[in-house]
Image (cartoon, helix red, strand yellow):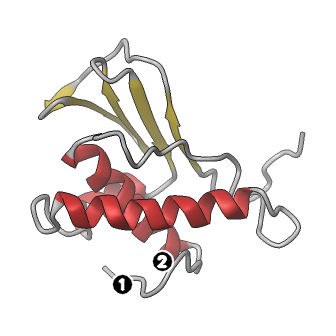
Amino acid sequence: MKTLVAVVFTLLVIIGCSSSKTTAKTGNADLSKASDTVKIANDSLEYEVIIIDPGFSSWLAGRARPRGYYSLNYLEAKNQVYVYEWNSRVLQPMLYDPNLYEMRIDYEPNIRYGYEVNYLIYNYFIYFQNRYNQRLAGFVPRQ
């Protein structure tokens, strides 16, 4: 297994398991933040999202559009496109940096993850594209 020599460690995962720690609750999703880690869990759907990336938490707090700015339908549509491209790049390590695209994202379009999950995933994709000079699909907002 390759060791990460890069300054950043990026991980975005949606795993089918439930959370055991909760520090804040938003809608039907539990949200925990510790330093540069954002964790969202929903026990009723049995999923968990973990975003680990230095700087994402502060970017989210200071530069992301506020909650409610985008509709849920918009976020779901954009996330489907971004996830598809992300997963495509995970499968092509010779073309795309495997240190950036480490693991597949299991995002099912027929599952309703709710606003908070879609909002955080969408904003991570915007942050990721701007920070690492990547273009997953179409126009990338500067934010």
Q: Badge 2: how crowded within 10 Å, few (<14), some, or many (20+)?
A: some
- Residue 50 tag number: none
Image quadrant in which you'd find residue 99: bottom right
Residue 124 left/right relative to 9: left
Q: Residue furthest top?
A: 20
Picture coordinates of residue 95, whole percent (x, y): 83, 73
* In this rendering, position of residue 118 left or right of residue 52: left
In-image side of 72 versus 93 (left or right): left
- Residue shown at 22% from the left, 42% from the top: 114
Residue 113, position as x, y percentages in the image? 29, 40
Q: Is residue 37 above or below residue 80?
A: above
Q: Closer to the camera, 59 or 26?
A: 26
Q: Is residue 108 above or below residue 30?
A: below
Question: Disc 1 versus disc 2: distance between alpha carbons?
Answer: 7 Å
Amino acid at the residue labelled 2? Asn
Q: Residue at x 41, y 70 (%)?
A: 126
The answer to whether 43 is drawn above or below residue 93 in the figure is above
Labelled pair 1, 2 in contact (Cβ < 8 Å): yes
Q: Which residue is mark 1?
A: 142
Mark positioned earlier in the residue sequence (1 or 2): 2
Label 1: state its secondary structure: loop
Disc 2 on helix, strand or loop? Answer: helix
In the rendered image, the quadrant that contains the N terminus is: top right
Q: Quickly name the residue at label 2.
A: 130
